[in-house]
């Protein structure tokens, strides 16, 4: 084997916690999986070293929440989605407040602290309908966080309500919105988005929503759904755009400490069953490789969340050695990924066992990664 001094230098650069370039990321991607995983684990240790009074590397967190889809009516017809319906479909719905209350009460009874609320792009729901829903939940359950509405939904709202994003997001926050999920990120490369979801928000739109939300003091997560029609270079471009936005949001906090930023990065693989997108899916090996690369590249993200929902409990656990420090949610309810054929489930006991079995302490957290126990 020929000694490669430049690779040695790159590995040391990663080990030391320094920022890498796109070209360097592509080189790292082709490392043996175990070696890439070890580098990602090192970067996780550096990122978490100062958390929880210096105990960040002993702890793996999780959250108890519920996915609530307030409607399955959607007019963007994404090829990778098996969840959406048209208004004419017999099984289309819009949630009632009574049904929503029951879901929240069940979640709180199970120790839950929030709901992740997203829906289809319904063409007829009014802004007041959303504001009334948010106000209803906040008034009835004041300590329960509403982690709601992905960027693509806000772009839809901008078109339907004919108002600027600042106005819409500000009004939603005032009504009770607590944070924003990173859904709809897919791959932040427009060539890819045009192929898989041409009627959905494009890359700049998605990032603009996050930038405005952060300006207004809301925190959000960042996601990537991969393993369909994108290239490895596309995945790295996606990571670059997330890192650049996080740099911008964190810099803003020097002038406005109340500004928000991305709390975590979550990636998962395309689930093909019952969808219209014809693309070769990828398995656990590729998932672990991509998550590890994400941890290394996103040097300004403290948290990386494992995706056991798409990968299964065992791979979700292994992902904690490939850069993840959080096992995500027990998913009291999940409707979108399960419609595409993935139906893994987990209890709090399962979550705690998986974490303990590989030597970490399990702790429940809230949306802002504050420990609740």
Image (cartoon, rainbow, N blue to C red):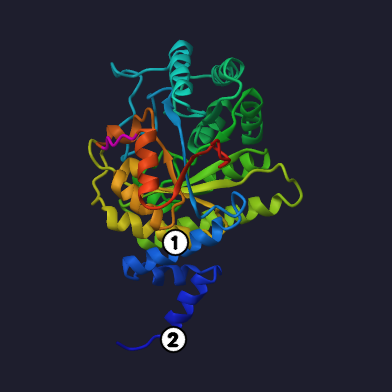
Instruction: Identify the main secondary structure in magenta.
Output: loop
312 w.r.t. 15: above or below: above
Residues packed near mark 1 inside 10 Å, few (<14), some (14 to 19) or many (20 plus)? many
Q: Which mark is residue 236?
A: none
Q: On the rendered structure, is 16 left or right of 229?
A: right
Which one is nearer the viewer's eye here, 267 or 225? 267
- Give the quarter of the figure containing the N terminus: bottom left
Tell me where residue 175 sits by quadrant: top right
Q: What secondary structure is found at the residue carrying circle 1?
A: helix
Which one is nearer the viewer's eye here, 323 or 25? 323
23 w.r.t. 155: above or below: below
**What residue sits right under mark 1 in the picture?**
41
**What residue sits right under mark 2 in the picture?**
5
Magenta region, residue range: 342-346
Measured from the top left, where is residue 299 in percent x and y?
Answer: 54, 60
| One can see residue 297 in this view | no
Residue furthest to the right in view is 255
Measured from the top left, where is residue 137 in percent x and y?
Answer: 56, 18
Residues packed near mark 2 inside 10 Å, few (<14), some (14 to 19) or many (20 plus)? few
3 w.r.t. 172: above or below: below
Q: Residue at x 52, y 38 (%)?
A: 365
Measured from the top left, where is residue 132 in percent x and y?
Answer: 58, 16
Measured from the top left, where is residue 347 in percent x and y?
Answer: 35, 33
């Amino acid at each position: 084997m020929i000694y490669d001094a430049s690779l040695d230098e790159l590995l040391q650069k990663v080990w030391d916690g320094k920022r890498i370039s796109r070209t360097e990321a592509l080189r790292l991607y082709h490392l043996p999986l175990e070696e890439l995983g070890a580098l990602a684990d090192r970067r996780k240790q550096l990122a978490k070293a100062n958390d929880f009074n210096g105990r960040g590397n002993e702890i793996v967190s999780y959250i108890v929440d519920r996915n609530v889809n307030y409607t399955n009516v959607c007019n963007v017809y994404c090829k990778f989605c098996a969840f959406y319906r048209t208004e004419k479909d017999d099984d289309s719905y819009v949630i009632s407040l009574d049904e929503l209350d029951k879901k929240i009460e069940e979640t709180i009874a199970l120790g839950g602290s929030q709901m992740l609320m997203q829906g289809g792009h319904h063409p007829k729901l009014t802004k007041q309908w959303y504001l009334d829903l948010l106000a209803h939940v906040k008034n009835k359950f004041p300590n329960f966080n509403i982690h709601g509405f992905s960027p693509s939904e806000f772009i839809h709202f901008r078109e339907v309500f004919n108002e600027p994003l600042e106005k819409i997001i500000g009004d939603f926050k005032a009504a009770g919105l607590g944070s924003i999920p990173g859904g709809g990120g897919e791959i932040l490369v427009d060539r890819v988005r045009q192929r898989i979801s041409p009627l959905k928000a494009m890359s700049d739109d998605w990032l603009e929503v996050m930038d405005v939300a952060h300006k207004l003091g809301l925190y959000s997560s960042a996601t990537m759904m991969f393993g369909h029609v994108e290239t490895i270079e596309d995945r790295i471009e996606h990571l670059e755009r997330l890192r650049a936005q996080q740099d911008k949001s964190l810099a803003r906090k020097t002038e406005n400490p109340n500004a928000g930023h991305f709390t975590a990065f979550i990636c998962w693989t395309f689930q093909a069953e019952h969808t219209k997108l014809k693309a070769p899916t990828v398995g656990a090996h590729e998932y672990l490789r991509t998550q590890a690369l994400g941890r290394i590249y996103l040097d300004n993200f403290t948290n990386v969340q494992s995706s056991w929902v798409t990968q299964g409990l065992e791979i979700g656990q292994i992902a904690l050695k490939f850069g993840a420090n959080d096992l995500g949610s027990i998913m009291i309810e999940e409707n979108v990924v399960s419609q595409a054929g993935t139906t893994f489930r987990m209890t709090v006991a399962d979550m705690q066992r998986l974490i303990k079995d590989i030597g970490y302490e399990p702790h429940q957290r809230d949306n802002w990664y504050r420990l609740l126990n």
